[in-house]
Amino acid sequence: MSESALGALTLNFTIEGRRTEGPEKQAVSAAWFPISAGYFHTLHTPLVRGREFGIQDTAASLPVVLINEVMARRFWSSEDPIGRRLRIDMINEPSREIVGVVGDIRHNRYDREAQPQMYVPYVQHPLVSQDRWVKSRLTMTFVVRSAGDPLRLVPALRAAVAEVDRNLPIFNIKTLDEYVAEQIWQPQQTMTLLAIFGAIAVVLAMTGVYGIMAYAVERRTHEIGIRMALGANRANVLRLVIARGLLLVALGVAIGGRQILSRTSR
């Protein structure tokens, strides 16, 4: 069993011993997660090198941090990050030693690729209770892996928490499949709405083109009659009408596309 703070914060950090130029100084950023020992084992996330957190990592021990592969490649591309030190931009935060590199995890459903991430032991989480850190101190997410139906473990989990403190609320229990379904629900709904609006737009456009074509043909009825009297057949008349309609459609697409491109470039 392992635990992690709900959500992820993107925090600045500075790399000790590295000099950089410019107004940004040494500040760079990465997603920040307080976790407990066993977190990556539970999620089957591989340890690339170094070590994971263990029972030796306590509130009184050396402050440590784990980073993912993306972060290692981005900020230590030409050197081994193990043993390097960084300082996270947080109240009462000490300098931390990098003790391991773990595999990449996409925590955000909108990320096409994993982003830089750093993990600290939950027991070394600074005791702050203000501003944006208050939620990570007041809430905790337990990640449990089971061999069978995970929902059957809920009574046992509630009993285990009650042994620690009966007043602690337990809420938002869900399986990994349910969590993934919730993550993709909003994009699916958005795509469905876009498809519906797109279909409505196509119907309106077709109705508009039909109305314009009908009006144009009605205005040219006398001309069409003269053409047929002079020997034009049905195919010639249809070609004339369709060519006119396609010209109007092409002009509309060109004007609309130009408007879209101009707004996108702003």
Image: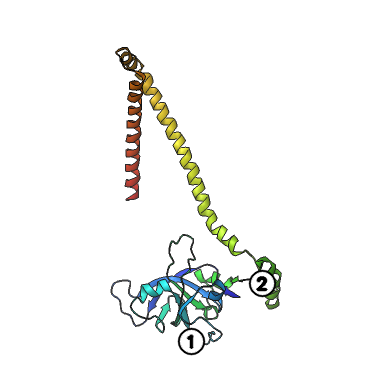
Q: Is residue 44 left or right of residue 234?
A: right
Figure check: 150 above or below 54: above
Residue drawn at (39%, 80%) of the image: 81
* Among the 4 quarters of the image, the one containing residue 10: bottom left
Q: Are marks 1 and 2 in contact (CB under 8 Å)?
A: no
Q: Within 10 angstroms of label 1, few (less than 14), some, or many (20 or more) residues?
A: some
Q: Give the distance between the C-alpha atoms of the residues marked 1 and 2, in whole angstroms.
A: 30 Å
Figure check: 113 above or below 51: above
Q: Within 10 angstroms of label 2, few (less than 14), some, or many (20 or more) residues?
A: few
Callout 1: SS: loop
- Please state, as top left, top right, bottom left or bottom right, where the N terminus lies in the image: bottom right
The residue at the far top in this view is 229
Total label count? 2
Note whether residue 12 is visible.
Answer: no
Foreground residue, 70 or 18?
70
Note whether residue 7 is visible.
Answer: yes
Q: Is residue 203 left or right of residue 166?
A: left
Which tag, 1 or 2, sits closer to the chain's start? 1
Residue at label 2?
Answer: 168
Residue drawn at (35%, 29%) of the image: 245
Callout 2: SS: loop
Q: Amino acid at mark 1?
A: Leu
* Among the 4 quarters of the image, the one containing residue 228: top left
Residue at label 1?
Answer: 62
Position in image of residue 79 (x %, y %): 35, 80
Position in image of residue 200 (x %, y %): 48, 38
* Among the 4 quarters of the image, the one containing residue 227: top left
According to the image, what is the colour scheme of the structure? rainbow
